[in-house]
Image (spheres, rainbow, N blue to C red):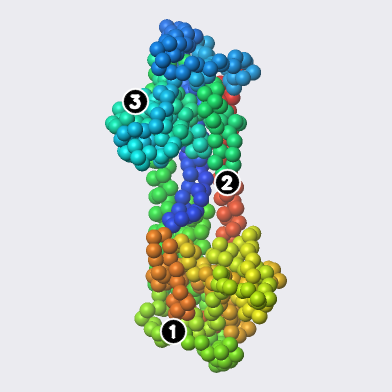
Amino acid sequence: MTDVNQLITEHLDVWASAIEKKSSAGRGNGGAVSLYGIKKLRELILELAVRGQLVPQYGTDEPADALLEKLNHQQADMFARGLIKKPKPLAKITGDDTPFVIPSGWEWCRISQLGHDWGQKVPDNKFTYIDVGSIDKELGLVSEPTVLGASKAPSRARKLVRQGTVIYSTVRPYLLNIAVVTEDFEPEPIASTAFAIVHPFEGVLADYLYRYLRSPTFISYVEGCQTGIAYPAINDKQFFSGLVPLPPTAEQQRIVAKVDELMRLCDALERQAEDSLKAHQTLVETCLATLTNSQTPEELTQNWTRIEAHFDTLFTTEESVDQLLEAVVSLAVQGRLSEQSSADNPFGSYWNEIRSTKNSLASKLGARKKKPIPEIDLHLAPFAVPEAWEWVRLDDVVDIAGGITKGRKLSGRKTFQFPYLRVANVQRGYLDLEEIKEIALPLEEVEKYQLQSGDLLITEGGDWDKVGRTAVWRCELDVMGHQNHVFRARKLISEQIEDWFELYLNSAFARDYFAGSSKQTTNLASINMTQLRSCMVPMPPIDEQKRILAQVKSFRRLAARLKQRISASARVQSSIADIFTSKFTEETCV
């Protein structure tokens, strides 16, 4: 018998340290993680439970073969009274069918032997509708049913359920939308046909069946017979043919109680791990805030020395390394990482050439009225810059243009199938060129929209993180344009460095500006041409830009290596959790 209490307490480090990064889609999820080790521990508890390795077997318990005989009698009696349909013949269960050896006193059976459904009906009055969205799958309860009138009944509202019924979603079963109906709902409850319905016979605990349906063994069975890709599913026949290891009723009760006890331990371990992660996150944020808020070079040095002394403790996750990198970029664009040199030509020495090029370009393209943008007000600058630096409007130092508009009528005009970049292609600091779309463009407009090496691509918007996202075009393909939701900014003289603009426009300061300036609706935001033109940008001397960019590039290489080590360590920790799970599961098969 496996002592799971001991298994948990002796290997807390294994279960708590194995974490995985979640998807970063959506605002605020960039640092979310999954407690993989604790997830595997929960699976192990369920697997040991249904294999009879969690609680002792007692000779005084009525064996499952006697229970199974009673279940057969109940089924036959309900059929005789017209309460259920005639049971279908069952395929014989052989040793080759069973996934593991069960204890003496247990029996293998099929789900159809353990319970029955209540039939179907078309709603003819008000009813309580239970669909997949009604399920709290973490608690295994029906938490949010809807009361509907018969006239508004969905076509899937057909399956009758009662208090004590187990419902199992056969559509996308990997989501584990499984529940026990614990309430006597009024008006009459009717479930979606997306559910398989099992109302256990007397002697079978709904709570035991619910836990078995969530076990790795049954999940593996479902994965082996489900069909479909976007919406994988199993049918009722496959579900009711599934094998179940049936313990005596008294042992079912002990199993449910023990599983609940151990899951509470997992809950506590999970809370502790989450609290530890939150505390670590707060510590990282606090330390980095002292760094970026340093008022003098001496204070900056002191704060960095303090962080450096605890580097291995602070930067243990990919998210914390990303935060450190963002702090470094913030310091870099403020000129607080580089030394200023009196030998550098100030950026102002290029003003005449920049303005001349801009005026020449405007004359060549034809005068187009633009909305006026205000003069620089240094009181509105996000930070003070070193003496040789200048604050400028983005429109002062680059040529900004919109992109290709879709949906124009082109009949009778010669066109070219022009590849173009969308918002999805422009990520923060890089281009995703995996999927490039094309559009029919008039031949005379190809040159107008053709990107040049060094062009900055800046996203108009979308969700909150897409606004102002900037990347540089490096002529990865010979011909490329950009859609109208992606702005193009082109430097005016060769001495300008596009990487400096990319660095600043992706920094926290520019992101704050775009967030404050953008037009926002529910989960969406966007900036217009005028707001982009008005963006304030700090301009160091060109030579200092080069020094800063070299420092940031060097740090990014170090950060990438550190993240690789962290990722490798996380994979090892997850593998250890997998090995532990497999080890203790295999021991039960001996």
- Please tell me which residue lies in front, 155 or 272: 155
Q: Could you say which quadrant of the image residue 205 lies in?
A: top left
The residue to which callout 1 is attached is 371
The residue lying at 57 percent from left, 66 percent from top is 422
Camera-side mark, 3 or 2: 3
The tag earlier along the polypeptide, 3 or 1, is 3
- Asked if labels 2 and 3 touch by Cβ distance under 8 angstroms, the answer is no
The residue lying at 45 percent from left, 53 percent from top is 29
- For marks 1 and 2, give the CA distance: 54 Å
The residue to which callout 2 is attached is 569
- Please tell me which residue lies in front, 109 or 567: 109
Q: What element carries label 3?
A: loop
Q: Could you say which quadrant of the image residue 561 lies in?
A: bottom right
Horizontal side, residue 328 vs residue 361: left or right = left
Q: Is residue 316 above or below residue 362?
A: above
Image spot of residue 104 (x, y percent): 52, 11
Image spot of residue 352 (x, y percent): 55, 93
Image spot of residue 295 (x, y percent): 39, 72
The tag earlier along the polypeptide, 1 or 2, is 1
Residue 202 visible, this orientation: yes
Camera-side mark, 1 or 2: 1
The residue to which callout 3 is attached is 163
